[in-house]
Image: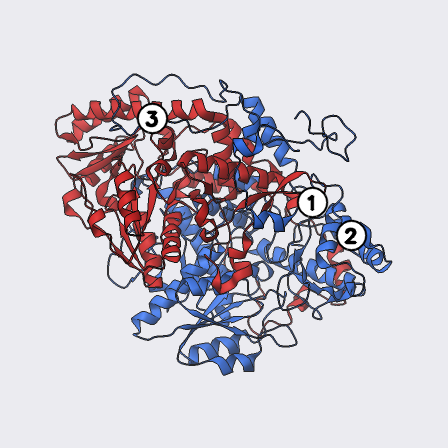
Amino acid sequence: MAGSISPAGETFTGNRALHLEEPLIFELDAQGRCGVDLDPAPAVQDRLGGLKRRAPVGLPGLSEPQVVRHFTRLSQKNYGIDSGMYPLGSCTMKHNPRLNEKLARAKGLGDLHPMQPDSTAQGALELIDTLAHWLKTITAMPAVAMSPAAGAHGELCGMMAIKAAIDVRGEKRGRVLVPESAHGTNPATAAACGFSVDSIPANARGRVDLDAFKAKLGDDVAAIMLTNPNTCGLFENDMIAIAEAIHDAGGYFYCDGANLNAIMGRVRPGDLGIDCMHINLHKTFSTPHGGGGPGAGPVVLSAALAPFAPLPYVVHDAAGYRLVEHDEGGDAQPFGRLKGYHGQMGMFIRSLAYMLSHGADGLRRASGDAVLSANYLLASLQDVMSASFPGPCMHEALFDDHFLKDTGVTTLDFAKAMIDEGFHPMTMYFPLVVHGALLMEPTESESKETLDQYIATLRALCARAKSGDIQTFKDAPRFTPRRRLDETAAARKPVLRWKAETEGTSAAQ
Amino acid sequence: MRYLPLTDADRSAMLDKIGVGATRDLYCDVPAGALLTDPVDLPLHKGEQDVERTIAALGAKNISPSDAPCFLGAGAYRHHIPATVDYMIQRGEFLTAYTPYQPEVSQGTLQALFEFQTQVALLTGMDVANASMYDGASACAEAVMMAARITRRGRAVLSGGLHPHYRAVADTHARFLGHEMTGPAPRLEGDEDIAGLIDDNTACVVVQTPDVFGRLHDLTALAEACHEKGALLIAVFTEAVSLGLIAPPGEMGADIVVGEGQSIGNALSFGGPYVGLFATRDKYVRQMPGRVCGQTRDSEGKRGWVLTLSTREQHIRREKATSNICTNAGLCALAFTVHMSLLGEDGLRRLAEINHAKAVMLADKVAAINGVRVVNDTFFNEFTVELTRPAALVVEDLAARGILGGVPLSRLMPGRAQFANHLLLAASETVGDDDIARLCAALKEVL
């Protein structure tokens, strides 16, 4: 810490009360300390075949209180849902109940080995089966693959099932249709399954252009990947027509379930004719985002795709629950395996607890509140900000940067100014179909008081931008642990790890 | 509903502002007939106590390793997790944050990821690591695809000692990308000849150490054989603690090192979520999949961190991305980093030494039982034994006696009759002398 007084700082330490500077853990090192007490290893003749490590790893040694303080200080530099409103469009940052955390660690669940005999894990298999039942019921789909570890992993699972189904039919279909407004993972997933990607334009109403879509159909089209509600926050009202058209052309309908939170308990995607859809348990069913994972992305499948579901899966008969971990022949034709073991059990527990808490009535209430709140934002802001499409929207409201035209303020500046006001910014520059997008998703977790404060803040920022006060925006954020960071320099000469020789033992300066 | 702040009065006021009569009117774009009027056919909401009771009842139907002597491994390992680890990852600022796309309010997550990447690079003996992957198996499959991109070759040679789940995930990806996967069949005795299978179209060789049977391998000669032919060597591990005692793959010439980090800081959790570790050489960093955190400066010149090299990723590159992966195992990586920080140099070495010593003691004890033969010459904390009966039946008999007595190889490789009587046994610092005594007594009864 010595010598780390910031030029702008007024303190000797560089700290400002609760704003505490914290070096890297490697810079806190003092040899001879350890944060765990372990007895010496019993003396044995080693069986390492001469492969014993010769050089030290290079890890620092710290006591437990130092480790606790280090990570506590780091945590204080983070904004979480617990801190405040997190209106990230497309991400569904809703409240994470602590009950779910408690239950994920409950006796017989947190400490359970994936390779225990099935006979000793009947409760775990029943839990997976119960969650599967909830997911199938909410979506009106006959089957679900539970193992994918994230939304994009679920996309991969669904598209692999589609490819396997096409292979079994003996057909060659290499093209996948993806709307311009799609998440980037959709085309990346299609490519990872060996498909080529063909982009479908949006119409003036922010939906798939039905005629343009139909014009692209052919006997080489494998699937359409469509997000519904879409990333503009709009329900694709031609869903059923799109499903019929893709099926008539011999293709499959992949639905990206990222925005299920708008419709859970109110609209069942299976009623609209889809073939598969991944469900982000970390969005819709509130397993914590954890600063970037872990998530979980189970995939519901139509009867046509169900046989191709990957290994493993749970079956239930008179003898109890059983894990099928290998291809056993019969009707099932699993396309393979996507991860080790059986899926994100810790996330299954949390999301089931969340569903049980809400029940069928509460899930409906929650999606309704999410949609109501987004429309409330839209209605309260459209006179000062430029809404990309007229309402009603679903659970997120999309604005473009037209309202900032000629102010000199960009979408990025506007978002950074929100940080100073105590809000996490909305999603910026996505979707790509509108210029300088600002996509807000309040979720059902925010009170009207918070929504009103958010609206008032945005209105004040709009007024400031139009008043010509650009500098405050360019300087934002001003009150964060760090000011704007140079992302260009980070990418040009990547420094991806600490090294003693480059950093010495100096701290922040 | 306790999680929903809006009151009926709030809802009316909001509907008035929007100018519609009911929430239902906001769903006017949904095709007629598809909008449900009633709740779906599932139970109604429950209070906290009821939910707790329901889930606890499911937990009570399992035999937990915390209640039984446990010798299970095969890629997931039971270790003691210091209380500090779970406390830290449950701090709301870590737990309820999103991916750190707004770095000014995410320095906590970012700095921890930078520390994680450094720890993984040090542990594996490599230059750089990414911010983690779903798990070890998916990290391995991504490594194979990365090698194909780097070498522009479409063939991978996989060792028979690779964990079958890792093999299966790599095979699944290869099937859809048209890559050829080959390699020798798993064998318990003698060395496999992998170097002889490398040809001019080989992108990579994948070898696990300790392998699925627990044996250790020196990769130095194989790395040289790979590099002579222009192929990359991918080294795999499933037990991160082993790297506290065993020479790291980076020192043996591996080009990519992948593995499972669960055993440091993460609960068993019936197989997930886990944390995939992925490390490589500097020169390949732009072909590396997944997120990566990098150091930079802010506008006042202060050191800080951001997610970087995102031009590799799908939100920028779409169908040309290096991988379809757009997340990491953030909180599991944090748990890894907190535990690793508590251990430090001395703690990790000592933990690894204890694990090895326990396994040696276990091996010597079971080897003395009639009808048990220890197969391995070398191992870290897990080894294979041959029994006189099918291992799957023995495991059930042990379970009936309240012992989680290892993983039968037949569960991992059901198609290979020669392994029907083989059992994988693991011992960590959580195994006590009395646990070993109970296992031995039970084995004598059931063999």
Tell me how far mark 1 sits from mark 3, CA to CA: 44 Å
Q: Residues within 10 Å of mark 1 (few under 14, many from 20)?
A: few
User: Residue A473 shows which numbered tag?
Assistant: 2
Image chain in red: B
Q: State which tag comes first along the sequence, 2 or 1.
A: 1
| Left or right of A203, for residue A377 | right
Q: Position of residue B344 (x, y in %)?
A: 47, 26
| Left or right of B246, for residue B313 | right
Residue B400, picture quadrant: top left
Front of the two marks 3 and 2: 2
The residue drawn where x is 44% and y is 42% is: B275
Front of the two marks 2 and 1: 2
Q: Amino acid at mark 2?
A: Phe
Assess whether mark 3 and mark 1 are in contact (beta carbons under 8 angstroms).
no
Q: Chain of mark 2?
A: A
Tell me how far mark 3 sits from mark 2, CA to CA: 56 Å
User: Residue B355 shows which numbered tag?
Assistant: 3
For mark 1, what is the residue? A84
Q: Amino acid at mark 3?
A: Asn
Q: Position of residue B416 (x, y in %)?
A: 17, 48
Residue B415 is at least partly visible in this image: yes
Tell me how far mark 2 sits from mark 1, CA to CA: 21 Å
Q: Chain of mark 3?
A: B
Image chain in blue: A
